Image: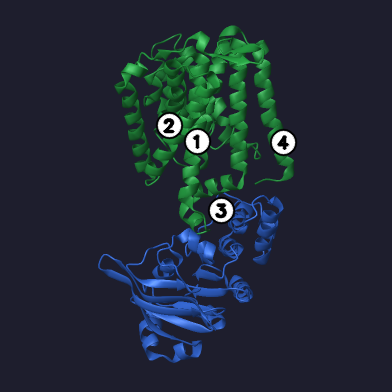
Amino acid sequence: MTALLTTKGLSRHFGGLRAVDDVDFSLETGEIRAVIGPNGAGKTTFVSLVCGRYAPSSGRITFDGEDITDMPAHLRVRRGIAYTFQITSVFANLSAYDNVALPVQRTLTDGRSRGAVRQGAMQALERVGLAGRAHEPAGALAYGHQRLLEVAMGLALKPRLLILDEPTQGLSDGEIENFIALVREIASDATVLLIEHNMQVVMELARRITVFNAGKILAEGSPAEIRANTAVQEAYLGTAQEAGT
Amino acid sequence: MSGDGTTAKVYALHAAVIALLVALNFILPEYHHGVLARVLVLAVFAMGYNLLFGYVGLLSLGHAMFFAAGLYGAGLPLYHLGWGVPAAFAGGLGAGFVVALVIGLLALRTSGVAFMIVTMMFAQVFYLTTLYFGEWTRGDEGLVLQQQTRQVALGSGTLDLTNPATRYLLAVALFAAALFATLAIVRSRHGRVLVAIRENEERTKMLGYDTFANKLAAVVTSGVICAAAGAAYALLFGYVGSTFASVQYSILPLLWVLLGGAATTLGPLLGTLFMYYVIDITSGYTSAYMLVVGLVLILLVLYFRKGVLGTMRERWVRWLP
């Protein structure tokens, strides 16, 4: 197994706040990795550095052997890093079809093939079960469907690394079951980095778990190891229980 | 963006509009014939503005500079250097292209209110420049392009741009070219990206699009269309003056587009036509015609918030482009 993504000494400071602080991280090709941690631990900031939404204060990021630290976000997407937003961020006034057609046409290089866009977009919608709603405006879809559309947009980019930022937030139990199956399917041909609060989802999907706390990696290991780790229990599970989630 | 049935309908509608405009050439009384030729050229200006404002969501307050770049780019070489009409028109387009490229590179570093202010400032600089070089431009007084310079040798005959019918039909031709260019752009993949930028730029970036490059392309296209209108105005109506670079001509296309419907292909024509006649008719009765214009705008905001065609699309005709 080779590392698809590595970060060395990655930091991002907002004023005096060290949101991400000297993080060394490595992700193997083909794995499903969950990133967990209390609110404000720096999870979203960390993946935002990886996908290029923020520039790091210091440190390096390597993707598939190439240093991408100074690469603008849209070029990282073209290298195969797709990010789905924590706060649902579909194009509400465009149809579901157009939402997915945008990433599909991006991946096509031959220019003029109108049929290929349609085919690719419908495929992505079918994979998440939204093909029947292709022509509804995205903003009119139910919340759970908007989350699935968000995932379909990520999938349509044919990513090598798909970053899912709290994808199950606000989904019902039934929807979560379907979602777990979907992520398993996605992982058959892509590496998945999953930020997730729902521990059931994390334990079912992840082969390894990385725990963030106060901008640093607190622990890393298999689900069983993380469950047994007392530092994690104190820092994360303790505060999570207090917060009632 | 739509099924095949609507594609045919869309092109039929636009072809019908062009056919109607050509037919009007033979029907309209002299005065309205002249007005409509002018309105068509100004509608091209509005369409250029609409491409950026309606589809990309960039509100510029400096588009007079692109119109004036075309106006002077065509008018000055024709007047001073004796260029022919086709070369002068190309000069206008070239001037618009260069100005739009430079302004785009600078102004697109900003967005929102800052973009409005920056474009307005650049347009003011452009306006003051036309006054400063009064020796060549004659400033507010302007230049009148003589009839004999506005003729094109065409085979054995000549095309006289001062002839009303020729002038009208050339205005229709320019309008048709701009209309179908706009239609092609907004229905293309590039057009889909432009709308996506308007809706959510951050998200578009995270789908792998270079939003800066797409916006720059839109500014340049918009600038060149507006410059085409400016160059045509100079050549067809024979007048080149600083008034067209003033802030008023940056605000007008915004009003025309808002009135007709932003992000609709035919809205700019409707808005320009309506506003032109409102001013034309009311100024016959009162010198306070701007009061009537204000009233119209208030009614528009109250009842047709998305402009006439924008509201029609929302409520009745969903397939309208």
Q: Secondary structure at mark 2?
A: loop
Q: CA distance from mark 4 to mark 3?
A: 27 Å
- The percent position of residue B93, horizontal first and vertical second, equals 50, 29
Which residue matches tag 2? B63
Q: Secondary structure at mark 3?
A: helix
Residue B9 got which mark?
4
Q: Nearer the viewer, mark 3 or mark 1?
A: 1
Residue B222 got which mark?
1
Labels 4 and 2 positioned on one and the same chain: yes
Which residue matches tag 3? A139
**Chain seen in green:** B
Going by the numbered disc 3, the residue's amino acid type is Gly
Residue A34 in sight here: yes
Task: Say above or below: A22 vs B196.
Answer: below
Going by the numbered disc 4, the residue's amino acid type is Lys
Labels 3 and 2 positioned on one and the same chain: no
Question: Within the image, what quadrant is residue B26 found in?
Answer: top right
- The percent position of residue B77, horizontal first and vertical second, equals 44, 21
Q: CA distance from mark 4 to mark 1?
A: 26 Å
In the rendered view, how is the structure colored?
Answer: by chain
The chain holding disc 2 is B
Going by the numbered disc 1, the residue's amino acid type is Ser
Q: CA distance from mark 4 to mark 2?
A: 32 Å
